[in-house]
Image (cartoon, grey):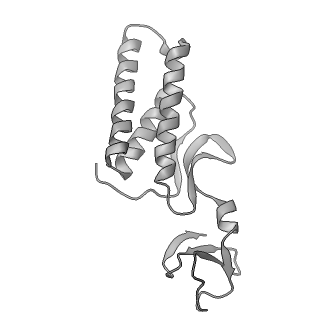
Amino acid sequence: MPVRKPTIGSVSTGTLRQPDLIEAFADELAAIDLGDDASAIVERANEWLIAQAAIQADGYEPESDAAHTDEANELILALSDALNERAPPYCVFGCHEGDGADFGFWPDLDQIADLIPISDPGDPRPSEDHSFTNDHGNVTVYAADGTVLLELV
């Protein structure tokens, strides 16, 4: 799978089932970063999913087992943390504010609101990250060097 940059939007929607979240989060992590720490978490997720499938093939429902559920929750948290560390600038990984079963990368509006606002992108730029909001409400976040980090339309 080719490595790509994470993008704003959903990674998993419409489910809170642990196996579904683990699979979606592990797939996303593998797609955006193949670093050693990410690979170890993805490998652990894949091992868990394989074990889950084998257990279910034997007719056992592991979701009813508290220890299995705790293990899955820990894995979901580890995957979420790894994805959050790789979120685009001024974004976070988590559930959508309006839908608790929609997980993905979302703009961190509090972090963006704390940036220095500029009135015109052509003006001399501040020596730190800053933002510009146009008359339509679109927001552009700039790095100190003027590079566009994030555009919210």
How many numbered marks appear?
Answer: 0
Please tell me which residue is depicted at 49% across the width and 26% down the height of the picture.
72
Question: Which of the 4 image quarters holds residue 6?
Answer: bottom left
Q: Is residue 132 left or right of residue 39?
A: right
The residue lying furthest to the bottom in this view is 123
Task: Say if 141 sits above or below 105 in the image.
Answer: below
Name the spot of residue 68 as percent of width and height, x first: 49, 17
Please tell me which residue is depicted at 51% across the width and 43% down the height of the picture.
81
Task: Say if 74 sits above or below 121 in the image.
Answer: above
Q: Is residue 26 left or right of residue 97?
A: left
Please tell me which residue is depicted at 57% across the width and 62% down the height of the picture.
90
Please tell me which residue is depicted at 65% across the width and 62% down the height of the picture.
111
Question: Which of the 4 image quarters holds residue 130?
Answer: bottom right
| Front in this rendered view, residue 104 or 74 | 74
The residue lying furthest to the top in this view is 59
Name the spot of residue 16 as percent of width and height, x first: 57, 31
Name the spot of residue 38 as percent of width and height, x first: 37, 44
The residue lying furthest to the left in this view is 1
Q: Is residue 29 left or right of residue 77?
A: left
Name the spot of residue 15 as percent of width and height, x first: 56, 33
The quadrant in which the C terminus is found is: bottom right
